[in-house]
Image: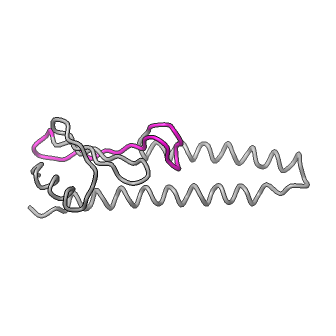
Amino acid sequence: MEREKIINFLEKFDYRYSVKNQVIEVKLDFSQKVMIDLSETTKIKISDKLVGWNFLTGLLVMSLKNAIIYNFIMSIISSFVFFYLQSLISSINFIPFYFVFILWLLMSIQYYVIKLENFKSRIMNLPE
């Protein structure tokens, strides 16, 4: 795929991007970046990372896949903490806080995955 077609697409839809050698780095909403590597002529490599402040990783920089794994592990740890606090302090019900945390986490993951996959499919389906 030609680099000019991708750049024309990005400019048409007002994406913020930068070009470094054969890599186009596109900035999506809420601190998500997508890197389009055009160094190989036969295929396109598309990778992503969450940078800066975002809902899934805070200030840590990592790919969306790693962020999902990280949040899965953190949700298991937080579930033990919430249930332990529930057993210590019976006057406060911590279970609703846990469910709100898990709901927020699932909605954030869903948002980032949909945004990334939608962008990837639009890039891959550009007219020749």
Image location of residue 66, percent across then percent down:
46, 42
Point out the image quarter for the C terminus: bottom left
From the viewer's side, name the closer residue of 42 and 37: 37
Q: What stretch is highlighted in magenta?
A: 39-61
User: In terms of depth relative to the viewer, which is nearer, 79 or 96?
Assistant: 96
Q: How many labels does the image show?
A: 0
Q: Where is residue 4 in the image (x, y as percent from the top left)?
A: 10, 51
Q: Is residue 72 above or below residue 10?
A: above
Which of the 4 quarters of the picture holds residue 114? bottom left
Image coords of residue 65 (percent x, y): 43, 46
Residue found at x 91% / y 55%? 91
Task: Kindly report the secondary structure that dominates the magenta region of the rendered protein.
Answer: loop
Left or right of 56? Residue 123 is: left
Residue at the image position 16 percent from the left and 54 percent from the top: 6
Q: Position of residue 63 (x, y in %)?
A: 41, 42
Magenta stretch containing residue 44, yes or no? yes
Q: Who's the residue at 42% across and 44% down the image?
A: 50
Display colour scheme: one colour
Residue displayed at 39% across by 54% down:
29
